[in-house]
Image: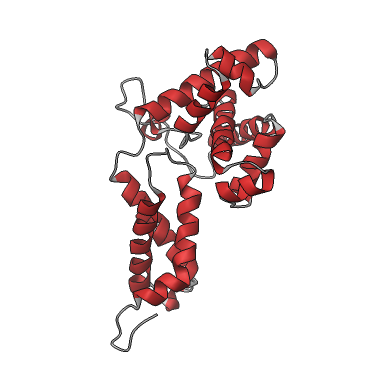
Amino acid sequence: MYTAQGTLDRSEAIERYGAMVRRVAHQMIARLPPNVDVDDLIQAGMIGLFDAMSRYDAAGGAQFETFAVQRVRGAMLDELRGADWMPRSVRKAQREIEQAMRRLEQSLMRPPSEAEVAAELGLDIGAYHRMLGDARGSQLLYLDDLGDRDGEDSWLDRNEVGDSDDPVGVVHDQRFRESLVAAIENLPEREKYVMSMYYEQDMNLKEIGAVLGVTESRISQLHSQAVARIRANLKEWI
C-alpha cells in the first residue's frame, strides 16, 4: 500500500478497502435522515481510511481492517457532528407516529396496522408513507430523551453508572433489555425481519429490499415504523 518513496499509495488503498468504506457508509445512512448524502459519508470515510493507514502499527496486534473500520466510522461520525444532520422535522414526525401508535395499542390491545396509524394521524396511506420517509434516521434514544426538562442536566450527570458490583444498576439494565426484547418480539413479522437482517446480519436496505421483494425506500419506511413501535413500547424508559 506504499510507493517506492514510502508514501501512501492512495489508488491501491481505494481499490483494496473502498468496498469496506462504502459498506460502512450504507449501513450508517439507513439511520440518518434523507438530507444526508451517502457520498459525503464515503468521502469522510476515505479520509478516515488514509488516517488509519498512517497510524496503523502491526505490532499492536489488531488486524488492519479491524483498526481501519473504527477509524472510518469515527471519521463519518465527525462529519455528521460538524453538520446539522438531524432536522427538528425528523424528530417531530417520529414522535407524532409514536404517539399515534401508543394510543392505538392501548385501545386495540395489539400492534396497529399502517392503515390504522394513518387514519389516527388523519392521513391517507401515501402521506403516511411520506411521513415515515421523513422520519428516517430515527433512533431508539435521542440525546433530548436523556436531558432534564430544561435541557441543562444530562441523564448521565443525574444517574452515575456504577461498576459491576452495583446490583441496582444491573437490575435496571436487565429490565430494560427484557423490555426491549419484548418490544421487538411484538413487532409485525415483516418489520421483525427487517430489524433482524439490518442489525443482526449487517445487511443494507437495498439488500433487505431484494430479499423481501420491495424497494429500498419501502424498507426505510418499515425500519422507521419498527423503531417507532419499539419506542412506543419503551415509553417508561425513554
Residue 66 location, x and y as percent? 49, 66
- Mark count: 0
Q: In which quarter of the image is the N terminus?
A: bottom left
Q: Can residue 135 be seen in this view?
A: no
Is 83 placed above or below 17 here?
A: above
Q: Toward the viewer: 139 or 60?
A: 139
Left or right: where 202 falls relative to 144: right
Q: Toward the viewer: 91 or 204?
A: 204
Left or right: where 197 falls relative to 88: right
Q: Residue at x 63, y 30 (%)?
A: 179
Is 202 placed above or below 158 here?
A: below
Is 183 placed above or below 120 here?
A: below
Left or right: where 238 falls relative to 77: right
- The colour style of the image is secondary structure
Please identify the residue farthest to the bottom as the structure is shown: 4
**Toward which corner of the image does residue 51 lie, by quadrant?**
bottom left
